[in-house]
Image: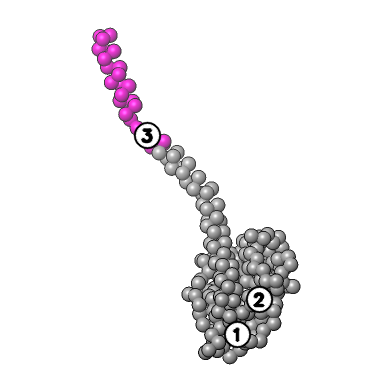
């Protein structure tokens, strides 16, 4: 009998170890996963929103730099045309032969959740604009203002100028385009020097940080 008990004991051990997880074990694991997901989701959502905002801001900043180079290379006028309502922007060059603005890039859209604006910020970045605001409205080929737009324009020497028809236009330091997702603001400004600068600030604060 003792020998039979010894033989049966390993079998009993194997039966216990092969039982697997109980329903309670599974429910505990599921609860832990749900808890971790609930904690991580807001952080992940905020991080993705920040990436979208920064990506849109960098795209505008890069296009402003390209407009400056285009103006000098083609010995003409070039600008970044922002449609504030449609949330789009593009590069345009003044065709001196046909006397009209011509698109020099495809139309780019801001990322989802990103709009033109500065969400309650009242002060411009240091040593830039006199007062915070989007660049002056764009003009059409005839020189008339286009509502709900903003343009950063460069002359053939790469200087930022007002939006009067070529060859008119006064050098200005009031150029800027700002985008926001409601929690932060990025801005691209152009000084009279001309120096293109990129900025970031939390929404509704005046804490501008040079990027």
Q: Residue 85 at x, y = what percent?
A: 56, 77
Q: Is residue 159 magenta?
A: no
User: Between 80 and 42, which is closer to the camera in this rendering?
Assistant: 80
The scheme the figure's colours follow is: one colour
For this rendering, which residue is in front, 154 or 113? 154
Image location of residue 31, percent across then percent down: 46, 42
65 lies above or below 38: below
**Residue 50 location (% of width, % of height):** 56, 59
Q: Are marks 2 and 1 in contact (CB under 8 Å)?
A: no
For residue 159, which numbered disc appears in the image? 2
Q: Secondary structure at mark 1?
A: loop
Residues under labels 1 and 3: Cα distance? 71 Å
How far apart are the alpha carbons under marks 2 and 3?
72 Å
The nearer-to-camera label among 2 and 3 is 2
Q: Is residue 176 above or below residue 14?
A: below
The reply to whether residue 117 is in sight is: no
**In the depicted structure, whether residue 62 falls above or below residue 76:** above
Q: Secondary structure at mark 3?
A: loop
Residue for badge 3: 21
Residue at image coords 38%, 37%: 23
Quadrant of the rendering where the N terminus is positioned:
top left
Question: Mark 2 falls on what kind of element?
Answer: loop
Q: Earlier in the sequence, mark 2 or mark 3?
A: 3
* Residues in magenta, as a range: 1-25
Discs 1/3, front: 1
> Mark 1, residues whose alpha carbon is within 10 Å: few (<14), some, or many (≥20)?
some
Where's the C terminus, which quadrant? bottom right
Can you tell which mark lies on residue 139?
1
């Amino acid at each position: 009998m003792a020998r039979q008990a010894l033989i049966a004991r390993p079998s009993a051990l194997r039966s216990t170890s092969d039982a697997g997880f109980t329903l309670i074990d599974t429910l505990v694991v599921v609860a832990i996963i749900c808890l971790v997901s609930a904690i991580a989701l807001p952080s992940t959502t905020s991080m993705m929103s920040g990436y979208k905002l920064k990506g849109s801001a960098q795209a505008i900043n890069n296009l402003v730099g390209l407009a400056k180079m285009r103006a000098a290379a083609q010995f003409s006028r070039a600008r970044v045309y922002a449609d504030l309502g449609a949330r789009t922007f593009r590069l345009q060059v003044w065709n001196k032969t046909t006397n009209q603005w011509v698109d020099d890039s495809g139309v780019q859209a801001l990322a989802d959740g990103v709009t033109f604006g500065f969400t309650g910020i009242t002060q411009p970045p240091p040593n830039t604009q006199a007062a915070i605001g989007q660049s002056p409205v764009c003009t059409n080929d005839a020189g008339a203002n286009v509502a709900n737009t903003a343009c950063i324009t460069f002359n053939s020497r790469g200087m930022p100028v007002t939006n009067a028809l070529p060859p008119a236009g006064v050098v200005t330091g009031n150029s800027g385009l700002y985008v926001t997702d409601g929690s932060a603001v990025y801005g691209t400004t152009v000084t009279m020097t001309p120096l293109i600068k990129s900025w970031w600030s939390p929404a509704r604060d005046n804490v501008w940080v040079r990027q």
